[in-house]
Amino acid sequence: MRPARVTGATERMDSPVLPEPVLRASLGHIAAVNSWLGGRRALLHHLAALWPDSPEPVTILDVGTGNGEIPRTIARWARRNRRLVHIVACDVHVQTLAIARERCAGDPDISVAPGNALELDHADNAFDIALLTLTLHHFEGDDQARALRELFRVARAIVVSELERSWPNYLGARLLAATVWRNNEITRHDGPLSVLRAFSPRELHDLAVAAGITGAKVFRHPFQRLVLRAERAASREGETRA
């Protein structure tokens, strides 16, 4: 049993204009939850599995980058592991993009640019890997499959990280909304709603099928985090891709 999925609701994070200090703090809350509940660890696990064996820098597109914490985490991990990478971090929200640009400034492995998940301004197969973290549930209806289709168009492999819609996740978000997030109007509202707009493993897989992505797999990670991963056939020499 899990809560019914909520559709047609708007998260405050998606409002075009927000109080900057409140937005900044809310983006920090999302990054913290990603760290506490294993989102970063799961992401790096899948990136390592997909990493091409090439002397050239691996190119990554991070769509819906938020405050830029994901690209910063990947860049640090790559340097520790002596791997070359270039990450393009994009977001459609103007204020959020400004915060990401500020936080990623000075990192030579990250570029920050505007980007709409539904219409990415990149050529087919422009990147090795494209990422979408805690962003897919912000879309409604056919736009969810459309976002996945665009992600897979511009990259040879994709990693989509989402919450699992479950009672433990929902009750945990309600508890945080009443305590840690109680003074932030965005996170207090959006945290529990994000869980109710999120997915079951079957729903996430069905979206990949609807997007025409064959061979996609959904993995469950601790703290009820879901990761959808898909690769193009023979995108790495000597391997058969899903």
Image (cartoon, rainbow, N blue to C red):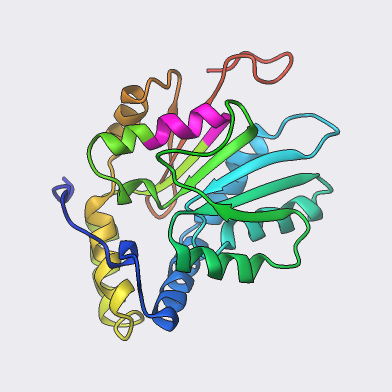
Farthest residue in the bottom direction?
183
The reply to whether residue 172 is in sight is: no
Q: What residue is at 75 percent from the left and 50 percent from the top?
A: 78
Quadrant position of the N terminus in the picture? top left
Percent position (x, y) of residue 115? 50, 48
Residue 153 is one of the magenta-drawn residues: yes
Magenta span dominant secondary structure: helix
Residue 156 is one of the magenta-drawn residues: yes
Percent position (x, y) of residue 123? 59, 29
- Relative to 113, is 143 on the left or the right? left
- Relative to 110, is 35 on the left or the right? left
Name which quarter of the figure residue 181 lies in.
bottom left
- Relative to 31, is 197 on the left or the right? left
Q: Nearer the viewer, residue 237 or 155?
A: 155
Q: Nearer the viewer, residue 73 or 151?
A: 151
56 shown above or below 37: above
Q: Nearer the viewer, residue 167 or 114?
A: 114
Figure label count: 0
Q: What residue is at 58 percent from the left and 57 percent from the top?
A: 70
The reply to whether residue 115 is in sight is: yes
Q: Nearer the viewer, residue 5 or 104?
A: 104
Percent position (x, y) of residue 184? 33, 81
143 shown above or below 38: above
Percent position (x, y) of residue 192? 25, 64
58 shown above or below 135: above
Q: Where are the magenta residues, as a range?
A: 147-158
Q: What residue is at 62 percent from the left and 13 percent from the top?
A: 240
Q: What residue is at 75 percent from the left and 45 percent from the top?
A: 85
46 shown above or below 180: above
